[in-house]
Image: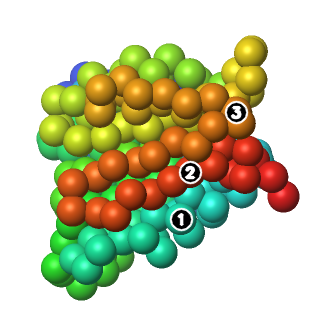
Amino acid sequence: MALPAPANTSDLYDLDHLERLANSNPGWGAIEVIDDALYFQPMTSELHSLLLAKLWLALHSARPDGWRVAFDTYIQLGPHRMTRPDVMAYRTDRPVERRAVPEIPALIIEVLSSDRDHDLVTKVALYRQADVARYIVIDPDGSDGWWIRDLLGGDRQGRAGEVFVLDLPGWPQVSLDLDTLLAD
């Protein structure tokens, strides 16, 4: 769900304001800013949380030196553009920030929730414009079984029962077994 910003208040939606909004309204879930509009993401489900943990673990254990993997963390993509991807990987040599990640991630992974258009349309254009190399979307509730798709890296896709190989430059191959990701 998007809520446009009131006129002449673009500075209102900085990270401090988003944190105050989220802390005072915990039922709202994640809040993102794209072109001065606030987007509210619903609270995550148990399945969503378990997928994020498994994805983070798979990427974190495979990451080369100089790379960091984070989940549910704000990134600044430009003026008035701040998103909170489910999982991301980025190259850095700086200490861990207590705020938004300043680097543009090489990889962003989103697990689809109820606002599918936000992840499949709005964010594809935003991440393409920000030069994100790979944008992986996972749909655990697809009408014909669940699927995974790389929307910026050649539009590769996989379905339940398959292994999806993630290829990031400078990384070893990371194989995501789709059925294992959904298993307890």
- Asked where in the image residue 101 lies, by quadrant, the reply is bottom left
Given residues 81 and 36, the one toward you in this image is 81
Residue at (74% x, 15% y) in the render: 144
Name the residue beneath numbered marker 2: 176
Residue at (52% x, 42% y) in the render: 164
Q: Secondary structure at mark 2?
A: strand
Name the residue beneath numbered marker 3: 160
Whole-angstrom CA distance, mark 2 to mark 1, is: 8 Å
Given residues 137 and 176, the one toward you in this image is 176
80 over 172 or under it: above or below: above
The residue carrying pointer 2 sits among few (fewer than 14), some (14 to 19) or many (20 or more) residues within 10 Å by Cα, namely: some
The residue carrying pointer 1 sits among few (fewer than 14), some (14 to 19) or many (20 or more) residues within 10 Å by Cα, namely: some
134 over 103 or under it: above or below: above
Labels 2 & 1 near each other (Cβ < 8 A): yes
Specify whether residue 110 is in view: no
- Asked where in the image residue 138 lies, by quadrant, the reply is top right
Q: Earlier in the sequence, mark 2 or mark 1?
A: 1
The residue carrying pointer 3 sits among few (fewer than 14), some (14 to 19) or many (20 or more) residues within 10 Å by Cα, namely: some
Name the residue beneath numbered marker 1: 58
Whole-angstrom CA distance, mark 2 to mark 3, is: 11 Å
What residue type is disc 2 on? Leu
Given residues 139 and 33, the one toward you in this image is 139
Q: Secondary structure at mark 3?
A: loop
Labels 2 & 3 near each other (Cβ < 8 A): no
Q: Residue 128: x percent and y percent?
A: 22, 30
Q: Quadrant of the N terminus?
A: top right
Q: How is the image coloured?
A: rainbow
